[in-house]
Image: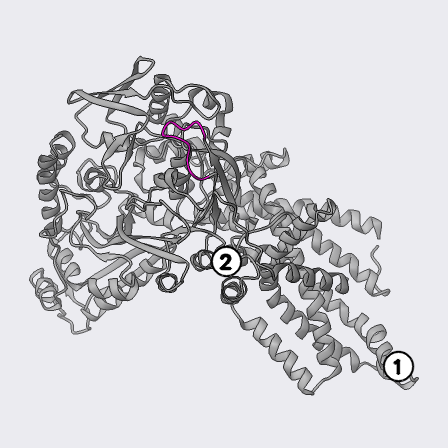
Amino acid sequence: MRRTLFVLLTAALGIALPGWAAPSGGTLRVGIDVDAGTLDPRLANDTTARRVIEQVYDGLIELDPQLRPRPALAESWTQLTPTVWVFKLRPNVHFHDGTPLTAADVVFTYSTILDPGLRAPLRGLYTPISRVEAVDNETVRFTLSAPYAPLLKYADMGIVSKAAVERLGADYATRPLGTGPYKFVSWQRNSRIVLEANPEYWKGQPRLNQVVFNIIPDNTTRSAALESGDVDLIHSPLSPQDVARLRSASRVSVTEMTGLGITYLNMNTVDPIVRDVRIRRALALLIPQQTIVRQIYREMDKPATSVLLPAWAGVFTDEIVQPGHDITRAKALLAEAGWTDSNRDGVLDKDGQPLSLTIRTHSEDPNRVQVVELLVSILRSSGIDARAEITEFPALVQALLAGNYQVALLGWLGLVDPDRGMYNQFHSKGSQNWEKYNNPRVDALLDEGRQKSDPADRARSYRDVARIIASDLPYYVLTYQGYIVGINRRVQGFVPIPNGSFRSLWGTSVP
Amino acid sequence: MVRYAVRRLLLVVPVVLGAAAVAFALLLLLPGDPAVALLGQEASAAELARFRQLLGLDRPVPIQLGLYLWRIVHGDFGRSVTLSAPVLQLILSTLPATLELAISSIILAIAAGIPLGLLAARHRGTPVDTGTMLLAQLGVSMPVFWLGVLLILLFAVKLNWLPSFGRGAPFLSSVITADLPALADSIRHLFLPACTLAFFNLALLSRLTRWALLEVLEEDYVRTARAKGQRERIVLYRHALRNALLPIVTIVGLQFGNALGGAVVTETIYGWPGMGRLVVQAIGQRDFPVVQGAVLVLALIFSLVNMVVDLTYALIDPRIRYE
């Protein structure tokens, strides 16, 4: 037994010695952090699923690197009235099984998303749509219940084949079939997803023959795989120390940009303590934002100035700022709010109650855990009886939904439009307004932003909201999340864009 | 012996169902439920409530448990909540990778651990003993994730000898089809994860073997064997080692269970598509059907391995008879 094993192992190492990795010409090997949950675009809710789906499917529109809608399956569109949109489909587009794309497929895609029975996670983005109908084979009309400016940006949802969904049922989620540049080949759970070029693609045949998504959950292993040449492309999340090593690796080029995510403190505005805006401001003044970004995020994420994202061109301005780091002012504010150390026990109190504060976050993100631990120690040294409560993500979300929290550190991703980053978060009727923030002025501004179509008008509304939020502080935005792509220098034509989209794989090649 | 084996086999059924019930109860104690995990932070409270109803999470716990056990007895493991696939299909597609890794790591651990322990025991108190036991000390105290990263950086990045992640062709099928390139690919991918997972067990086994042998070597019958002029090799292998094997077999059985469950870290570091990762992700996302199904399968394997261990005792020690 021992001898056999020894022989086998020697053989394995012997074969290993000559450079085994012989990459074929047109294959791009992507290293990705998590497996996809589903490959049905209507049900997808994770970053991997989205990246694979972008290759297999097309939406009515696609977003360019500046996040502007560009024609995809829809050749053109017109807004007939503020609540009626008409999309003209590109002729002669076929699904991967050869059947033609028709208006019925578009109607089917959107009406099933809107059907609560499908349980589409992003259904909320489309609920302003009251009706979708096929005018003819190549024309689709969307009727809205109220004007809804962001609709166009959300129209990048992959269009599914009605016939294939009806034929495959639940299996459609694991055997995706669309009109995109790459066709689905195979999916081995927790291992790899393989796609091949669609020679009939309407933009023209993609340059790669094959795209392989390798699922490598460990950040360090994923970086090592790029460094050793086992994969050609990796992206965030990456650990700061690994990025530092990649920057000095000869065969790798690293691109960094500000992405479409924020990390923020959510402050419960109906909590007996936190509802006092002076407490929220004092908290903001106590946060050493620059130190956190430097020491914990190693400057991969950037210090945020407000809820406006730098990627929102025309809306972002760094003139709107949240309170900066100022311990003296924080202490003055706490005193002004009536919190003093009357019994000399080192903890501030008011009416016999100590100033206790629990900051929650989720255990999956070690950086967030570190930030919360740092904040707790800072608050304690300022006389606040602070505690950290770290749980897994589902438990945190449950606490937020129940309003059972004071302050929580978490994040938002994929904020392609200001509406996506603010409406549901700050509108008194917003579905993610867990902090129960209620400001009629903000409600009116957010409704305006949704309903106006002139970009300058929208920008003004969202800037006004951001200014109010920076002062009322239901959110304190800690960082703008960075987006990092590491790529083998052999790879040509890949353009990283802030929303993490891989649409440019169509024109990518690996000589 | 056969009757005993059959009886043990029948006992496996209640043990496995018990494990399923315990797993079920433990999951209900966790805060957070699959509705939240699946719909994410974008979902509204109304959507969550509707979804809970669809999953049957709004029913009384005993009814949920009863329905669950009833379905299991009928071979229905249910459908994953977060991954659009049946639970049984998910388990069957990841179990072979985990078994491959666990078995090869145990073989490595036995093949290296027992000889090292023997070596140390034979040369007790010499530098050989000290060196071997230092290595063993390192093995039991080195964290798996650290060892894994070191091996990757050395063998994949620096030397570029072995792949940094993933599983090659399935080992068993490439052996059966005698497909040599596939077999080589399989072993190249298997080598680092198997070594990483084996290191702790190897260290433990070598320490245990040394201790068990030294214990046995003090026995009267060993002195008798030596006194009657037996060669040291015969004394060591035939008289001492055979008796020292009992605790070793016990530990190997337990280690196999640990290798199945404990492969999670190794699987994560090496991107190994095994069941450990599936289960840990499922726990994090409160995907109850997947966790329950996997616990059931693991309990089944663990019970069977334990049974084999018990039966092996009788083979090693003729005094042990099962009625």
The answer to whether A95 is drawn above or below residue A258 in the figure is above
Tell which of A60 and A249 is nearer to you.
A249
Label 1 chain ID: B
The answer, for residue A125, to whether it is visible in the render is: no
The answer, for residue A348, to whether it is visible in the render is: yes
Tell which of B195 and B296 is nearer to you.
B195
Q: Tell me the distance, in whole angstroms, between the alpha carbons under discs 1 and 2.
A: 48 Å
Residue B160 position, x and y percent, is: 53, 62
Tell which of A482 and B108 is nearer to you.
A482
Q: In this view, does A209 lie to the left or right of B94?
A: left
Residue A454 position, x and y percent, is: 11, 32
Amino acid at pointer 1: Arg
Q: In this view, does A240 lie to the left or right of B272?
A: left
**Of discs 1 and 2, which sits in the foreground?**
2
In the displayed orientation, state which residue is furthest to the front.
A511
Residue denoted by label 1: B231
Q: Which residue is drawn at 74% across and 46% down?
A: B176
Span highlighted in magenta in the image: A199-208
Amino acid at pointer 2: Ile
The answer to whether A45 is drawn above or below residue B23 in the figure is above
Residue denoted by label 2: B269
